[in-house]
Image: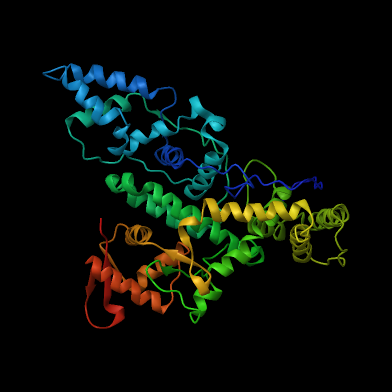
Amino acid sequence: MFPISSELKVRNNLLDSYFPLRNKGNEFDWDKVTGLVLSHAFKSQVSRYEFEAFREDCKRRLLSSLESPEFWDVLDRIYFENQDIFKFSPLFLLFNAQFANMGKSKLGPANWRLGTLFTSLLAKFSIPTPPQDRLNFIEQEMLDVLKEKIEPLTQNPFGEEQPYLPYLAEAFQRDMHFLAAHPNYLLQEFGNTLKLYAFSYCSQLALNVRTWRDGEPKSKPLYFILDTEKASLERYKIQHDGYKKFAAMSVFLFPVLSALEVLQVGDKKRPLWQIYSDVENSAEKDDVFVKLKKYVEDFTADRRLKARTSPETIEQVFRQMEEVAIEQFEDSKTERASVNKKYVKELEDKICTDFIQSRGRSGRVLVLNQDYLLLMTNLAIGVRPKLRLHELLIEFEQRGFYVDNQTKQALVAFYERMGNVERMSDSGDAVYVLKTV
């Protein structure tokens, strides 16, 4: 297969993969998103079974077991009136994502894009056995009713995207394995887990989107403080490798990813770093060079950009393609510039709002609140009983969260207040952090 599209035509900027946002229409329903992701993880679906039909089937099943039929009214109020049944087993959440009945249009394009992001992170990972829920007799009967209607999900409805950030995909899959072993914690924190990863993915993608020459991406430093800490102008990493770095890099997401769409070929989407690697190792390398060179010339003329010197290598022509893709948005008087600004604003408003705070003279900083900190601590420790502090911070970094020495001290103080710290000595290396699950 030719490593890039054989027909490179200049067209309007289009973004159709690797990013869950558009310049408008990004109202996410996280309940639906959790259903989509769990359906993919369990390889199961509730396709043509309405919730009201499930309610009636549960009523019929339980009336045969209840001594007093009037007790059904109590059960109905407890489990069904406000859909509280969803709080008792992850399998009930499959009602939030009924593919056959709802499809992309009814689930919402924004929710579908997030579902695509998370299924890309999951790749071929799945949870082979249903979660071992601790249910009472009545809840187990209801779950048995549902299990009779659950069907296998044999196809990925989202299409295939090779993970753009393999290190983040690896962490997400480990975290899904841990959550599946703790279904009550999954029910409690799965929505927050997805919000945490949506932010981590978008922020790390921004830091990696222009590093395609370096091969498979690696976690890039991005520094946070606890939301209880004071932000100081003297804290170099917080000021220079925190929010400002993220904001400076996020402006490249739409330009570079829309340029990537032009190169895609076949049904499986590939990251830019993979396409570049495929071209470098391809027997058609010279033909790709000629096609890309012509495309850059045509694009430059169409967008009325300054002419480039003639490239001599594949790397140079890829770099020129990236440069012109970015340069077309730099004229503030054009509509393209305003569209790119909308992408950046939507990213901060819809994905990043829980992780950004304004701190007076220090400006905007990246923060971790207590809820996300505890969640990430439990996820990072995972199936292990505890981790040394420095090992825990390595796990944080794989998920895209870095802290400086001052925040490290604040972390230890926070864990000590929570009572989930073991000190083997006064040395910082001998501090162990335990799960709270």
**Quarter of the C terminus within the rendering:** bottom left
Taking depth in this image into account, of 193 and 335 the one nearest to the observer is 335
Return the x and y of residue 189 as percentages of the image width and height. Answer: 35, 49
Return the x and y of residue 178 as percentages of the image width and height. Answer: 33, 52
Identified at 40% across, 52% down, the residue is 193
Identified at 37% across, 47% down, the residue is 190
Taking depth in this image into account, of 270 and 434 the one nearest to the observer is 434
Residue that protrudes farthest toward the front in the picture: 360
Identified at 29% across, 24% down, the residue is 145
Q: How is the image coloured?
A: rainbow
Which corner quadrant of the image does residue 128 belong to?
top left
Where 434 sits versus 341, above or below?
A: below
Residue that protrudes farthest toward the left in the picture: 67
Question: Is there any visible trace of residue 268 in the rendered image?
Answer: yes
Q: How many marks?
A: 0
Return the x and y of residue 49 as percentages of the image width and height. Answer: 40, 22
Taking depth in this image into account, of 398 and 198 the one nearest to the observer is 198
Return the x and y of residue 191 as percentages of the image width and height. Answer: 40, 47
Where 235 sits versus 37, above or below?
A: below
Taking depth in this image into account, of 80 and 264 the one nearest to the observer is 80
Question: Is there any visible trace of residue 275 in the rendered image?
Answer: no
Identified at 40% across, 31% down, the residue is 95
Q: From the viewer's perspective, is 398 left or right of 296?
A: left
Where 329 sits versus 48, above or below?
A: below
Which corner quadrant of the image does residue 210 belong to?
bottom right
